[in-house]
Amino acid sequence: MEQIINMEEQFEARIANEIRIEPKDWMPDAYRKTLIRQISQHAHSEIVGMLPEGNWITRAPSLKRKSILLAKVQDEAGHGLYLYSAAETLGITRDQMYADLHSGKAKYSSIFNYPTLSWADMGTIGWLVDGAAIMNQVPLCRTSYGPYARAMVRVCKEESFHQRQGFEIMMVLCKGSNEQKEMAQDAFNRWWWPTLMMFGPRDAESPNSETSMRWKIKRFSNDELRQRFVDMMVPQAEYLGLTVPDKDLKWNEERGHYDFGEVDWEEFWNVVKGNGPCSKSRLQARIDAWEDGAWVREAAMAYAEKQERRSSKTQVVSSKTESGRIVA
Ligand code: BYC
């Protein structure tokens, strides 16, 4: 008992002194549990996040746009893999994480349950959704768990490129024909509010925030990051000549921030519970990919076992040779 209290004190002292917690360090069960929850959900978001954009690879308007989009979607797969690896260091297996996603137990970001209806959605996702991801993830480069923080450094570099490419698509559309401008505004109208939902519920309704902030897993609250995001995006929308679809949006001189309207929280919770416009098809696509890939996993396992058998046979032969009993 005394030993646990001691370890708990050491853990809290490390957190207070900004010393990262590493996989082999002692950590409270609740810290491990909430990290597995957040990191695995983050990984699932990256993987499910490939679907709405993957939908446009075959319909990209030029070869250049197609290759950029392909590279971006591949980057998201990479992010998912770093994050699954980071979660595995906490003692959960990848198979378990996939099983939790497929059964609906584990969540993924609500944003990916909306459809991508036009090419302008590719620009809007890059600009807005990746913009929100950067706002949320840059502080995670300083999160208290070492493997998560290190994964985030690379993820954020790649996300910055993604955001630039999204903004550039929007620039081209907004400078284009009336039809292109309308397409850009329509995509912006559809994605603005769901993007604000990415930051999670209001602080007062966020059950995980208090402990996650205390343990420095989260560095800023959901509402703080949402406000920063609005402050950053409004001037960019103005630059593009787009109208933010919020009649309550107004610069507040006193606060030094934009005031903005209320997110539709009923819609948010509905999507989080799995009733978003594309929730069923997104999850089904992941389940199908898992089932269709069974033969690849089986073949890889059979190959690994064959290699293992071969190398153990070679070891027996070479150890016999060394002992002088067999001479080739
Ligand atoms: N969607 O207590 P709260 C990307 C859940 S990938 C769904 O505030 P927390 C990209 C929350 O999980 C971006 N669920 O939670 C990829 C919790 O339920 P549980 C993904 C949400 O964890 C490809 C409950 O609501 N980014 O950008 O303190 C292409 C109460 O919430 C959402 C990350 O995952 C939501 N939006 O704070 C392009 C970042 N919000 O788990 C782009 C890492 C909340 O108790 N994650 N919930 O059952 C985080 O920073 C935090 O987990 C959150 C939520 C801010 C999201």
Image: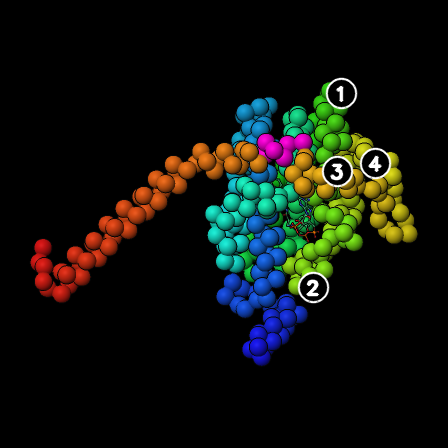
Q: Mark 2 falls on what kind of element?
A: helix
> Can you tell which mark lies on residue 81?
none
Question: Where is mark 4, residue-wise?
Answer: 246
In three-dimensional space, the C-alpha distance between marks 1 and 2, rounded to whole angstroms, equals: 50 Å
In three-dimensional space, the C-alpha distance between marks 2 and 3, rounded to whole angstroms, equals: 29 Å
Q: Nearer the viewer, mark 2 or mark 4?
A: 2
Q: Nearer the viewer, residue 118 or 238?
A: 118
Q: Residue at x 59, y 66 (%)?
A: 28
- Left or right for 84, reference 120: left
Question: Where is mark 3, residue-wise?
Answer: 267
Question: Where is mark 1, residue-wise?
Answer: 178
**Per the image, is 281 magenta?**
yes
Q: Mark 3 falls on what kind of element?
A: helix
Mark 3 residue type: Glu
Question: Where is mark 2, residue-wise?
Answer: 214
Q: Residue at x 69, y 61 (%)?
A: 211
Q: Mark 1 falls on what kind of element?
A: helix
Q: Mark 1 or mark 3: name the one nearer the start of the chain.
A: 1
Q: Mark 2 or mark 4: name the one nearer the start of the chain.
A: 2
In three-dimensional space, the C-alpha distance between marks 2 and 4, rounded to whole angstroms, equals: 34 Å
Q: Mark 4 or mark 1: name the one nearer the start of the chain.
A: 1
- Left or right for 85, reference 252: left
Q: Nearer the viewer, residue 183 or 12?
A: 12
Write down the quadrant of residue 131 in the picture: top right
| Magenta residues, start to end | 277-282
Q: Nearer the viewer, mark 3 or mark 4?
A: 3
